[in-house]
Amino acid sequence: DAGVIQSPRHEVTEMGQEVTLRCKPISGHDYLFWYRQTMMRGLELLIYFNNNVPIDDSGMPEDRFSAKMPNASFSTLKIQPSEPRDSAVYFCASSPDRGAQHFGDGTRLSIL
Amino acid sequence: AQTVTQSQPEMSVQEAETVTLSCTYDTSESDYYLFWYKQPPSRQMILVIRQEAYKQQNATENRFSVNFQKAAKSFSLKISDSQLGDAAMYFCAYRQGNTGKLIFGQGTTLQVKP
């Protein structure tokens, strides 16, 4: 079985540019999660979806961040405009109802 | 609000020895799940073991086992016969039964000495 697939693996871009991170969850999983990991703040939950519907976006830092899940097999996390403090590793994870979360390999984002 | 605490930022163990990583949590819920994840330098988040709160029996996965003390709200991970490949950051995580949300501890970095 394919796991959670994230793209790109690495992204380097300049401040002010739009960044789009992509995620394909495991087929059949009802939940999808976006996390951000930094040395200072550890793992932070940004937003999660249940059956494609956003349930809790209280972790989204500010209006520059947005996430969508147009269908059960695809989600995006967008940052516009990007800032150097957004540099981090962004993880997508999916899980079945009441199951363990399975993580993608993450996207290392660097904003110059 | 639920919280998860890992009080050991770093631990080390000799290869082939046993090590225990600590985790405590705070909740008023009765239905929940607990997990340990491993994050090696490759940065992948790998599920190590899970425990359902309603199960009294401690979960075991090969060399990994947990000591789940529900009343004490403690969930420690024991790694037996430690191997060099066990070196990683280990995260304890809590999930409420009725939501998908995971709450992570701060992590414990495990060093395995040859």
Image (cartoon, rainbow, N blue to C red):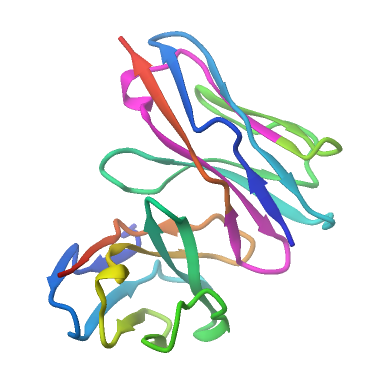
The percent coordinates of residue A19 (x first, y second) are 22, 81
In the figure, is residue B4 to the left or right of A74?
Answer: right
The percent coordinates of residue B53 (x first, y second) are 76, 46
Q: Could you say which quadrant of the image residue B76 lies in?
A: top right
Circle count: 0
Tell whether position B90 is magenta: yes
Query: What stretch of residues is rendered in magenta?
Result: B75-103
Name the residue at 44% across, 83% down: A62
The percent coordinates of residue B90 (x first, y second) are 47, 37
Name the residue at 37% across, 56% down: A38
The percent coordinates of residue B88 (x first, y second) are 37, 33
Quadrant location of the N terminus of chain B? bottom right
**In the image, residue B80 above or below residue B6:** above
In the figure, is residue A20 to the left or right of B86?
Answer: left
**In the image, residue B44 above or below residue B61:** below
Q: Could you say which quadrant of the image residue B75 lies in?
A: top right
Query: Is A50 or B92 nearer to us in this picture?
Result: B92
Query: Is A90 or A54 nearer to us in this picture?
Result: A90
Tell whether position B99 is magenta: yes
**In the image, residue B88 above or below residue B99:** above
In the figure, is residue A56 to the left or right of A62?
Answer: right
Name the residue at 24% across, 71% down: A84
**In the image, residue B53 above or below residue A100:** above
Quadrant location of the C terminus of chain B? top left
